[in-house]
Image (tube, coloured by chain):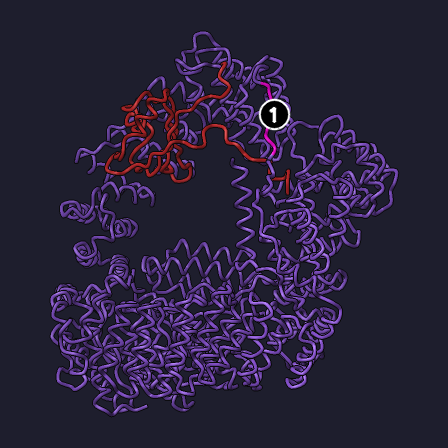
Chain colours: A purple, B red
Amino acid sequence: MPFHTPLQENMAALLRSARLLRLSPSGLLNIAGTNRTGPPLGRLYSGALGGSRTGACSRLTRPARDSVSISRVWPYTAGSLRGYSLATDEKEDGSVMVRSKQAQQFDWALAKLDSSVRRTGRITKTLLLRIFHDICRTGYPSSNQALLLLRSCGSLLPEVPLEERTVLAHRVWEKLQELGAQFDVSHYNALLKVYLQNEFKFSPTDFLAKMEAANVQPNRVTYQRLIAAYCQNGDIEGASTILGFMKTRDLPITEAVFNSLVTGHARAGDIESAKNILPVMRGAGIEPGPDTYVSLLNAYAEKGDLDSLKKAMDEAESADCSLMDRDIMQVIFTLARAGHQEHIPDMVERLRHERGYVPDAMNLCLSLITQGQEETSFHILKSFSTLEPDNFNSDSSNMGNFFLRHCVNMDTSVEKLTKYCKELQETKRHFAPLTFSLHCALEAKKTGLSLELMKILKEQGFPIRPHYFFPLFIQNSKDNNSAGITEVLKSMQELGVSPDAETLSIYILPAFPSTEAARQALTDAGIPLDTENFLTLEVRALAVSDLAKLYTLLSDPSFPPLDHNHFRSSLILGFRKSDDVESMVKITELFYRDKRFTKEGSKPAEETSYFLYNLFDSRTEGIVQAQEEKLRKYLNQLHAQNIKIPLNIYKGIKNVLESYNVPELIKDVMALVEPKDERGSVSAAPRFTVIEGKVLALENKLAELKAENKPLGTILKQTIQALCAEENLQRALELKQQHEEMMIVGSYATLINLCCRQGNVEEALHLKRELSRKDSSVVLDSSKYIALVKALSKNDRVEEAVDILKEMKEKGVVLNESNLTMLFYVFNSLVAEGGVSTIRRLQDTIFTLGLAKPTTNLCSPLISAYLESKDLSGALEATLDFQKRYNQLPRIHDILVALVEKGDTELLQKAMDFVSQERGEMNMLYDLFFAFLQTGRFREARKIIETPGLRARPGRLQWFAEKCIFVNQMETLEQLVDMTAKLFECDRDEMYSYVLRLCKVTNNWQKAEAMWTKMQEENVIPRETTLRMIADILKNNGQEVPFKMPEAWHEGAETAQQDEPALPPTTAASASEYHTRLLALCKKGKAKEAFWMIKKADQQGLTLTASTYDHLIRALLADGSMEDAMVVRDIATSRLPGFQLSNIAISLSIVTHSKKGQTSDALEKLKSMLQVGHVPSQLAITRLVQALGANGDVAGIEEVESLMKGLGTNLNLSSMIFLSNKALAHIKNDDVDSAIEMLDSAYTSPDSAKPGMSFVFRKVMEDDNDKALDKLSAMAERLANHFACYRPAVDLFLQLLDMNKLEDAKFMLARCNGVAQQKNMLVSYMSRKAQFPGQSGKIKALISLIPDFTEKEVFYPYLMKCHFVDKDLASAKALHEQMQKEGMVIDELSLKRLAVLYRNAEETVPFTEPPESFKFYADKLKDQVTKAADE
Amino acid sequence: MAAPAKKVFEVFVSKIPWTVASKEMREYFGQFGSVKKCLLPFDKDTGFHRGFCWVGFSSEEGLNNALEKDPHILEGSKLQVQRNRRPFVGQKSNRASEVD
């Protein structure tokens, strides 16, 4: 829409002044006072003040400090990453087997990088490499991941030199290609961008040739970037060639191209032509943007032409292209690199320190240092401090840490470094810059620099400590570089530091072949050694090499006292390495009995037990498991030597062993416990407390009505209902007349409702009066009341409607969600009739009475009514009134739109003032932005959204986008997306997805394709869903999809290909097409068809990607088609030599083998998997163990068990899995006794956890193995009766119950009635059962067998839940009655459940339904239980 | 050895500057009472300590003295000093599987 009215021009001016004002907070404060009475907006509109910096808009900006908290704007370098954001649209419902892990991983990597960029505007090389390796390690990288990695190899790495970045990019490219990632044009474009950012010299023609060879079509963005590449080298001719090419292809020439040409001409030495590009642009209808000016500024900067630079800056300013700090920073960077440092102060002065200045400037500093421009960098650094003092901790000022660290890493000279440190310290910017630099130098293992810094520190009087040298030793130690160590030691000596024992043994000795060699080397180097230290050293050396010798040395009476803690860790290490248990015991005993080896004052025995604890604690789980026998022997011998440990140490070791899954050793440790300490702690069983209740009021009304309910009544009711459904009011009323006496409330309600619907208000009111004559306490259904209100209001009987509302309040009618919606429609129906006053009256009444909360929805009809009658001022007044009273601002957007359209500046000013004040400036700006967008005032809209400091409000953006999609406003939507390109924290992918959604609705594939190109131009990394959307739109229009289709496993087949033929594609089909089709088939569960297709493809000689094969294999396995899966594997291996099954696929094949009983195959798979370091899924292990159990293969289970122990990570496998299945295996082999023996010992062993064994009982019962069952049940009863171990007995009892063997259960109870007292287990069974339908019988059976196992207060609610889950109203009613008969208090949760049952059966709830949600009452109950338990 | 459980008077110290080693820690905390134990783990890969430390006093008095002081400043850094809530023997609950 063109803007030609002066009004609009001024609007823009007004907004510009707002932007500028914001930048000078002091000026803002000065005029704050006068503003209240300052010139109104209207004067600005009239043009009197033009671009003045005073005026109303300053007011708008004033509250910014409090209301808008903007931490920082993304730095310039981050521009390319704005598309990073968490992709949260992955649903969790995909089945584990088919769900692509890639998407998850992408999210994770994205989140990692995103948070780094958000915090700092950069990525560290370490982080990038870690993510790169992780992605590589897990197999097949998706094309999204490839894009992500590539895009991170450019200016997001300011700490990495340019050449190194490009090397990195190439490494990523090649590695990913090797791993089978498919590159499309977006990847090539990303690589180009990285080349440009890294100023990498390459041949554009070669690049194009490479693309052509890969059969990837270049697009507009590709050409644009190639032009930029030529221009970077000042090659105008090359650029022109590409330009010509673009023209012949009819590709639009965008601003970016012109910007490149500015640079190109300048670099070619023709600054005049560069300057002339600007008028050329205007001639072509493209207004030069800030980026154009930045190109020009950089051109002047390279030449060092300060005058032209300044002039161009002013020109930009007057052309309304205000330069941001980050633009000026670019100029500074250029000046520094071109050697024009003298002009830099001029530019630094121009920095306005916008919000987000610091991270941008930090990145500038880093880039400068990387380029060897530390001086300039330091200059910039010094501009920080005075500006954002709150950015730093006040207690320890440490400004410039990043600066110092990067200087160290970039090998800045010590002289410069100390100079910077001095200045930082003197200006109180940094508390200890030298110490910090030393830390960095040590971290980077820069020995020379570290030593020099230490020298300086020492000169300044700082202490130099032995541990400062540790990092330096470590590097040499790792390389076994004894000469290097000696060198460091010498320097240490020079600095007056002598190594202590710790330094010697941990950091120095390992680099020498022997202690003796070390002693010799050090003496030779002239390093004197402390005797005690060296003694410790010797002991440590012996500890790890020869325990027997160590014992001889220590036990010698001439050996001086030496706390064993000085060599404890070496000794522990030695114990681990050695098999000399005898010496271990001797040494331990020595510590235990000889005072020399503990510190004076502490007890040897006690210290020794700590040593024992440490011995276990310092080992890894794997080692303890591997050395179990050795440790047992050791412990037993300690026991034989009568060595005792206190109970708490035992507990500690026990905990360690339990967490290491070596409970078997616990017994041996327990033997060491001092007898008087040996008493088990009595653990109090958790109490289950019944909710104490109050007596609830009886439901008298219900009983009364029920008593009168005679058969005739029911029929009458049904008839009336039927008549009403047919809208036959006449006849229904007649029937009512005839049977006045039999009429029930429900029938009246139905009739009233019908009357209202038909607009027969009189009759409705008549019926209502009649009803209340019969029973004045009757409460109508809330929807009937609302119908009455509606009918009355529509018939201009507002006061009567108000009376109805009052009655509702009196009778306690509660309005639910749908009632509120009805209410909204009632109001809305009044809008068209100019019902301002009616609506207002009703709203006031409802809100005052508290019948409904004043929501935006309920408030908005009044505004609609005003708008309908074109009363804008009334509408504004009303909405402002709502804001004041209820904190709601209904339809403000529509009001603003109307005001903008009308050009009513005064009211607009008022509205903005108010919104700003009430809702904050940010909201006001959004409101205004949307209003301008909506009315097609795009220029003004852009001004608003470009207000510095404004950040994305995803909710608001979505709201507007959805609006555009809904009413099909493509232009507005596109503008929205375009304008928010530089908006802070704007989720670009999300924004583009809105346009794409509209494209999909309108089937506009051209637009969709253009969006894809634009996303590349903007460096947005699309989410998979977005890509899928583009692909769908293109495909629906018969267009080729120019990228690899993301895999859509969990999105439901219908969104993808509706016209999917089950036939294989034609021979010409590419691998990627195959891939798509195959995946579609797989996800539809047609793995078989996919299988035939892949075979056919193979016959045609087609090679597909590894991930395609992998997916199909997984799908086939999920179907249980093992053979077919193996065929596919063979095809894959023959085509891709390095092909390996993925983790999931192997796990699935284990499951499949197991299910088919092919346990040896499954076991083999598992072993091969573990060998290459893959982790099987928990399901795979469970199924395998179960299959082994069913086969009676005890040894097999034991093998799996030990394999799993060796795995190191715990898969959350219950220890019972192995135990139960071993037992079942024994039983299968007809060796019930072994099974019993094993279970018996498991349950009687003192400290093992005692999980349930229901699984064993169930299997045995399912197999009808009575013999085994008898023995097992005897065991369970024995455990219960003799050992008070009830778990197995209860499991058996409940299993019997569960399988409906009630008689058996009864007998068992008689034999073993301890079961009846296991309340917790029984209640927990009941609570489990109550969650699934059809289980009420089980619960009833349980209570019939053990009538008093729990209180009724516990039992009834569970039973009610059962009925609720079963949707069994009849039973629930009966239960309710029984509860009432028994005088029980019914908790609200049960009552709520009952009420819902009534409602679902469309019966009137005969009591007041508890109004809150289920969760509310459940929480309340829990709360009561906890409280009761606490008492 | 009659005590059923060993009493520990330990503080857990974190945010320790890298320049400080266990000798300095002992010296610093020695002002509050006799230090019985001082464990400042070093990372064997980097050669720097991990920034946290356990300091055990021989008496409750030392512990209380140390806890009373605030802030603890050592070489310009503010140390975070807390009573060691998880003394030597950690209680791990195995009861979770009892009732499910």
Q: Looking at the image, can residue A504 be seen? A: no
Q: Position of residue A296 (x, y in %)?
A: 22, 77
Q: Chain of mark 1?
A: A
Q: Looking at the image, can residue A706 be seen? A: yes
| Residue A1214 located left or right of residue A795 | right
* A1304 relative to A932, above or below: above
Which residue corresponds to the image point at 64% horizontal and 58% vertical from the top-left? A1394
- Which residue is tagged 1? A631
Is disc 1 placed on a helix, strand or loop?
helix
Q: Which residues are magenta?
A: A678-685
Q: Position of residue A255 (x, y in %)?
A: 31, 82
| Residue A373 located left or right of residue A717 | left
Q: Please rate how many residues cluster around mark 1, counting C-alpha atoms within 10 Å: few if below 14, some from 14 to 19, many from 20.
A: many
Q: Main secondary structure of the magenta part?
A: loop
Q: Position of residue A1390 (x, y in %)?
A: 62, 53
In reply to whether residue A681 is colored magenta, the answer given is yes
Q: Amino acid at mark 1?
A: Leu
Which residue corresponds to the image point at 53% horizontal and 17% vertical from the top-left? A588
